[in-house]
Image: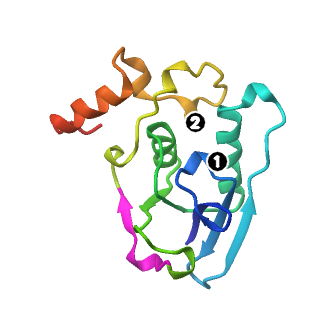
Amino acid sequence: MIYAIPCRDNQLSNHFSKAPAFLLIDSDNQQRQLIHIPETLDEGEKHCGKKSVRLNLLQQHQVQAIVVKNIGQAMLSTLFKMGMKVFAYPQRCPLDALDLSQLQEVTDMSYARPSPNKTSHSCCHVKSACTSSVSATKLNPRTLDKLQRIFNIHR
């Protein structure tokens, strides 16, 4: 299986959608490859274009699993729809000491963080990368997330 880990300066990036590179690890042969995410040229694609570039890059490299520290609801939902496995990165673990067999799989949306900016994105021509059920409500995404956790509601 090929895993992708979002990286910044050869270290784990705190957020999947903001990482400038991915470290790819092939679990069969332990081969590692750092791939940089190309910048989009069109300023109108500032948010969504970068996300679609990431998703296309993952597909081109036949990535089957993502290892993340933080990820937004819309992106996690998109990865699930693409059939990607998602794993939580262990705390305080350097990249060179990561043991893929010890990763905990993320299986539901409660791991994701709501995006306070998600309701303002109108640039999306890649609907799967930017649509979210959070944007269908008038509640602030953070308020909605807190209510879901209080009442133990899973989407």
Query: Which colouring convention does the figure follow?
Result: rainbow
Q: Is residue 99 magenta?
A: yes
Q: Position of residue 146 (x, y in %)?
A: 26, 33
Q: Residues within 10 Å of mark 2 (few under 14, many from 20)?
A: many
Q: Residues within 10 Å of mark 1 (few under 14, many from 20)?
A: some
- Residue at image mark 2: 129
Q: Which residues are magenta?
A: 98-106
Q: Is residue 55 magenta?
A: no
Give the farthest residue toward the right.
Answer: 41
- Judged from the image, the secondary structure of the residue bearing numbered disc 1 is helix
Give the farthest residue toward the left.
Answer: 151
- Please report whichever mark, 2 or 1, sits nearer to the chain's N-terminal start: 1
Any mark on residue 55, and which? Answer: 1
Q: In the visual, does 1 lie left or right of 32?
A: left
Q: Amino acid at mark 1?
A: Leu
Residue at the location (39% across, 26% down)?
134
Q: Position of residue 95 (x, y in %)?
A: 55, 74
Residue at the location (55% across, 72% down)?
1
Q: Nearer the viewer, residue 19 or 63?
A: 19
Q: In the visual, does 152 lie left or right of 12?
A: left
Q: Nearer the viewer, residue 29 or 11?
A: 11
In the picture, residue 25 is in which quadrant?
bottom right
